[in-house]
Image (tube, helix red, strand yellow):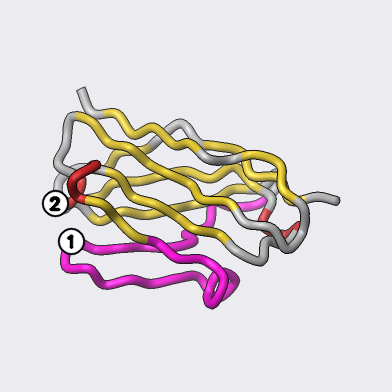
């Protein structure tokens, strides 16, 4: 069965950094687009970053210059490095793997940016 497991969330002060990991099982992650979404209370789920099978990367405007998405094929894992974190980044972060015929989600990991 397909499973995506996020890790690396937690509480961090403004200006700090976190590295989120999304480890996949049951799929070869490199054959899927990898996405990071986030959802804060009372807000719509927002696409933060994407890395396609071909390596094309896109970020939300709010993430550009601060966040970096990457993947490690050997570890079957997609990462989101988050630097210069702001309180507005506080949300539940979800990993997603998407292909033409399938769409999988992780359970989410909480990121809280607060002093």
Query: From which residue to which does the magenta span run?
Result: 43-69
* Helix, strand or loop for disc 1: loop
User: Mark 1 or mark 2: which comes first in sequence?
Assistant: 2
Q: CA distance from mark 1 to mark 2?
A: 6 Å
Q: Is residue 22 left or right of residue 115?
A: left
Q: Tell me, yes or no, whether the highlighted magenta stretch contains residue 60.
A: yes
Instruction: List the single residue furthest toward the right.
Output: 115
Q: Is residue 97 left or right of residue 69?
A: left
User: Are discs 1 and 2 less than 8 Å apart at CB?
Assistant: yes
Q: Residue at x 53, y 45 (%)?
A: 93
Please tell me whether residue 10 is drawn above or below residue 70 in the rendered image. Answer: above
At which x and y percent is residue 89?
66, 57
Q: Residue at x 49, y 61 (%)?
A: 48
Q: Residue under label 2, please give it.
A: 31
Please tell me whether residue 58 is drawn above or below residue 6 in the rendered image. Answer: below
At which x and y percent is residue 35?
37, 54
Q: Tell me, yes or no, whether the highlighted magenta stretch contains residue 49.
A: yes
Q: Residue at x 76, y 57 (%)?
A: 87
Q: Nearer the viewer, residue 16 or 31?
A: 16
At which x and y percent is residue 70?
34, 60
Please tell me whether residue 80 is drawn above or below residue 77 in the rendered image. Answer: below
Disc 1 packing (10 Å; few <14; some 14–19; many ≥20): some
At which x and y percent is residue 84?
66, 66
Disc 2 packing (10 Å; few <14; some 14–19; many ≥20): some
Q: Is residue 84 left or right of residue 14?
A: left
- On residue 53, which mark appears? 1
Q: Residue at x 50, y 70 (%)?
A: 60
Q: Is residue 9 left or right of residue 102?
A: right
């Amino acid at each position: 069965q397909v499973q995506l497991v996020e890790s690396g969330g937690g509480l961090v002060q403004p200006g700090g950094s976190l590295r989120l990991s999304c480890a996949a099982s049951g799929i070869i992650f490199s054959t899927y687009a990898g996405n990071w979404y986030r959802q804060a209370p009372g807000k719509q789920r927002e696409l933060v970053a994407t890395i396609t099978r071909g390596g094309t990367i896109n970020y939300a405007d709010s993430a550009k210059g601060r966040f970096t998405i990457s993947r490690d094929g050997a570890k079957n894992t997609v990462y989101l490095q988050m630097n210069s974190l702001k309180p507005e980044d506080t949300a539940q972060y979800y990993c997603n793997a998407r292909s033409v015929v399938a769409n999988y989600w992780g359970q989410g990991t909480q990121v809280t940016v607060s002093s």
